[in-house]
Image (spheres, helix red, strand yellow):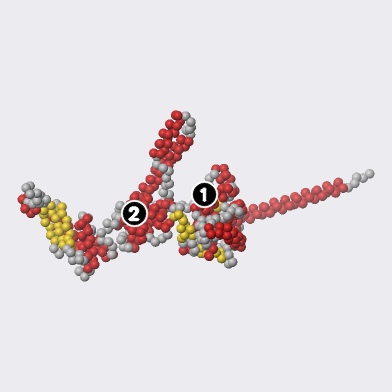
Amino acid sequence: MKGSTHRRCYCRDPKTGRPLGKNCPQLTSRKHGSYSVRQELPPREDSTRRSFNRAGYDTLKAAQADLDHVRALLGLADTDDPEGIHLIAEMLSDVSRDKLPLPEVEETRRRLNAGQDLVGSLTVAEWLDRWLAGKRIRKSGISRYETDVRVHLKPHIGTRRLDRLRVSHLSEMFTAITDANADILAQNAQRRSAVEDLATVPWKGAENRARRKAMKMAIDAMPGFRRITGPSTRQHIKATLRAALNDAIGQQIITFNPAAHVEIDPVRKPKALVWTDERVARWQQTGEKPSPVMVWTPEQTGAFLDFVAEDRLYAMWHLIAFRGLRRGEACGQPWSETNLDRHTLTVSGQLVQDGWDVEASEPKTDSGFRVVALDDDTTSVLERHRKQQKADRAEWGTAWVETGLLFTQEDGSWLHPGKVTDLFERLVAASGLPPIRLHDLRHGAATLMLAAGIDIKIVSDTLGHSDTRITRDIYQSVLPHVGKNAAEATAKLVPLQRKAEAEEASRKEEKARRKARRAKKAQARGKKKTKRKKPRE
């Protein structure tokens, strides 16, 4: 195809104002004007002509180098590959129109052979928008992804080209997030201190009122209280980006996923602790919980269930405490999947929150679809609950909302999971027991099953875990007496000489004590006989 270089200037006739073009008398000088290139491209599908044009070269050598570059790109596609020829021509046409740098020949060859876009001008933000639009998961999951994209990914790396995203860019992003956390903590502390100072200023008196007004204005000018981006959120940001880039690799847009190689601080999940007497005493003194995840002892669980025995949702608290259902699973459990005659219920759905809205959804994971066995007492509790619900239905009459669920509001409509949590916290506070979260009842159910010697696989299946390791790592909070029994059983397995000597000494001491007690009893009997003997006359 035809291609050429030429030199031109932009001088105009001073009389007519028209460009002089080749008639410019100064074109004989090599320093006047600039060089341009023009290369014919394969015609469009409608047979219209198109070409690659570029101007502004200072030297003929530079113009000729770019013309050779364009021809090398055109030669990448074989003559019997009309699709490849069309893609390269379209790429060169776009590069010419948008005045983009010419892509490297070998990189273009690789992209062409891999079926990727030949011009990697797609930004991270554009790809994330496209990726989100194609996701087909539940609404709450989309909202979480969207938050990561909007709040963190777009502001930090959104303008970068997708194919040029590197591990170092992500490291810089997470460093910036950590630095922002430090600023947020400092600003929160400053605002909190100002609020505390304001509380110490009296209300009465013109001077005090003026001072309070000035302090309020200063507080209003400060940034509001904000939450930091914690380790769990940072891990979720990384997971969101990694999933998005994996899909880009699957569509052959990129070949490398930097999110899979960036290192950030690991998340240390809080360990579940049991409310022992010592921890309860400490909590009563300071009001502090030893861990964000706390578990009641069997006695404390029983005390709570006794306290809420007359609560309308007692059956729900009982079911979660003994069978470990998740909050959303309990709220969304239908009667159609509950067979009290066979002492089973099938978890097949749940109610989840999206913001404050509630929607029905499938279980959290595939392993969440499960059959849960019910003990006799739990079955009786659910039977009584069903009778009460029938009475409520009759009382409400036509105003009753038929949802078919085990646990509902007074009129039969859905329970709001957030309000259920609030109610549970109020009941715990009223009971006087040490505080736990509603989800900690699930921890407690797992702990009770493990303490009762139930096989770990059965516990895992009951809770709906995909792997028994999850059950061991998260839910196996050892109760004090279980740990003591395990320690004693372990110690008895090791034969130690000092242990044998100690046991022998203990037996001798016990034998001596028994001998002393017998002698003391014999002496006491002798004294009694002496007292009974009559004195001689």
Of residues 393 and 168, the one drawn nearer to the viewer in this rendering: 393
* Any part of residue 457 in sight: no
Name the residue rendered at 21%, 66% in the picture. Answer: 45
Crowd around label 2: few <14 · some 14–19 · many ≥20 (10 Å):
some
Disc on the earlier residue, 2 or 1: 2
Query: Where residue 129 appears, x then y in whole percent?
Result: 34, 56
Q: Which mark is residue 376?
A: none
Q: Which residue is mark 1?
A: 291
Q: What amino acid is labelled 1 in the image?
A: Ser
Secondary structure of residue under mark 2: helix
Q: Residue at x 55, y 49 (%)?
A: 426
Q: Residue at x 54, y 44 (%)?
A: 287
Q: Residues within 10 Å of mark 1 (few under 14, many from 20)?
A: few
Q: Is residue 433 above or below residue 472?
A: above
Q: Disc 2 residue type? A: Val
Q: Which residue is at the front of the view, 364 or 160?
A: 364
Closer to us: 217 or 366: 217
Q: Position of residue 288 (x, y in %)?
A: 53, 45
Residue 177, position as x, y percentages in the image: 38, 48
- Label 1: which secondary element: loop
The CA span between labels 2 and 1 is 35 Å
Q: Position of residue 314 (x, y in %)?
A: 58, 55
Q: Quadrant of the C terminus?
A: top right
Between 305 and 261, the one lying in front of the other is: 305
- Residue picked out by circle 2: 167
The answer to which quarter of the image holds residue 241 is bottom left
